[in-house]
Image (cartoon, rainbow, N blue to C red):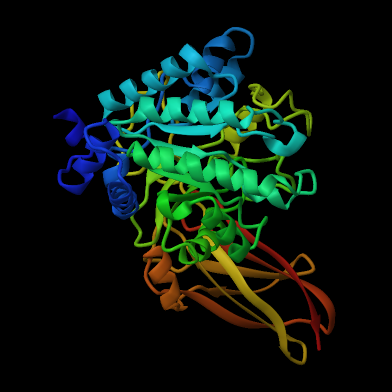
Amino acid sequence: MRRTTLFGTTGALGALLALAAGALTPTSASAATTAATIRSATAATLYGAGPYRSDTSEAAKAAAALATSDPSGAAAARTIAQYPVATWLGDWTRGTTLTKTIDAAVAGAERAGTTPVFVTYAIPQRDCGGYSAGGFDEATYDAWVDQIAARLAGHRAAVIVEPDSLAMLSNAACSTTLDQQRYRILAREVAAFTAAGVPAYLDAGNSNWVQPAVMAARLDSAGVRTARGFFTNVANYYPTAQEQAYAEKVSAATGGSHYVIDTSRNGQGWRGTWCNGPGAGLGTSPRIVSDGTALDALLWVKTPGASDGTCNGGPAAGTWWSAFAKTLVANARLGTAPAAVSAPAPAAPVRKVPSVAPVAHRDAAASTATRRVTVRGWAFDRDDLGKSVTMRISVGGKVVGTTVANTSRADLDRVYRVGASHGFSATVAVPSGRRSVCLVAVGIGGGGDTSLGCATVTVR
């Protein structure tokens, strides 16, 4: 049967899909087995040939609409349209519109052997009155989720469940009475998708929002241990390495939950604001990850080119913003092409994919002796892992020394599978006083350099 071979396997996963198709009764025991199967499956099993790319995505629509009036904007939209982007389902998709949206993505993905990624975004009191305010009441929402789960049952798919729904509980704009309703709604939603055999990921905010232990407690309250796991960085800009370090802590605190990271706009890192960040760039293109950690995939969840709201000159939330799309493409850091995913034929000539910038982190910067500062950290560049990244050290805008990241750091190999020889430690001469010590990882390929920022050090 087709439904028992969608993942290219049989046995427990076949039973999962049979349950999803209604061939089995979802008893407590079978529900537990289904959840365990979803959590233990490999990312390659869940995602097949990778995330699904739609020919009718928002970017594809924008490219057609702008062809005459804004040729450069159309070109940027075409570039974005070459990559898989999640399909958002909200209070604007109901009834037959919801059914048609899901069916079109599922059918297209099955033809390509890929996996459609959906986002649910209609929870009661969504965004707590912010730019994306809205959502259903609880009863309507529950019925809406059931419709989605029923439509996906027996098909390969993944669901990003309600971005910001858990992280935003820290915000003063959210009512203090909202917490228990959120946990109740989300736990029920996760249970519905798990019973349908669909891996679901709950909201874990991002690395600069909620502490890992607090986030893990919220995820547990929302039923993460019966889901595939959680997601981070949706609609934000934080570097992938920073997000993965955060996510690994949350994963360890939630029973080894898997996770995905949104890289749709993090090519240039944090932009000083979450809302239409100036100077942002497309991040690593969507791909399955198999690096020995709990990371399943890098996805484009937020639609690149869609406005966050009427901030920094943007139009209403969700509206295509051509100027922003052009900036994202101009500043892209897409990484090397993923070998595991067969790229679809683009509607327009594909730009050469740029190399990736180094991944780097500053562990410490401190005055260890009179007129001396010691810096420590790590860096690697996937353009050539056999070469050591050069670190440039500056004080007050003047380069005072360089070092290479070639010392042993076994923890890096455990997390990133890049080998151990990527650490650095260097001591440089610096005048006494309060000094700004800055680090830059110099790129090996054509992906540019990575700034590690500056630390204020009181030098003896």
Task: Identify the residue shown where x is 17% and y is 43%.
Answer: 9
Q: Count the labels in the image.
A: 0
Quarter residue 277 falls in:
top right
Task: Identify the residue shown where x is 67% and y is 55%.
Answer: 209
Does residue 82 appear in the picture of this structure?
A: no
The location of residue 229, given as percent across then percent down, is 44, 51
The location of residue 358, given as percent across then percent down, is 51, 58
Q: Nearer the viewer, residue 192 or 302?
A: 192
Is residue 362 depicted above or below 62 in this figure? below
Give the left or right position of residue 100, taking residue 323 as reference: left
Task: Identify the residue shown where x is 54% and y is 50%.
Answer: 222
Quadrant of the drawing holding the C terminus: bottom right
Task: Identify the residue shown where x is 59% and y is 12%.
Answer: 66
Quarter residue 453 falls in:
bottom right
Quadrant of the drawing holding the N terminus: top left
Is residue 220 depicted above or below 399 in this figure? above
Q: Residue furthest top?
A: 68
Is residue 75 depicted above or below 119 in this figure? above
The location of residue 406, given as percent across then percent down, is 46, 76
Q: Residue furthest right?
A: 433
Give the left or right position of residue 368, taking residue 348 as reference: right
The location of residue 430, given as percent across then percent down, is 76, 81
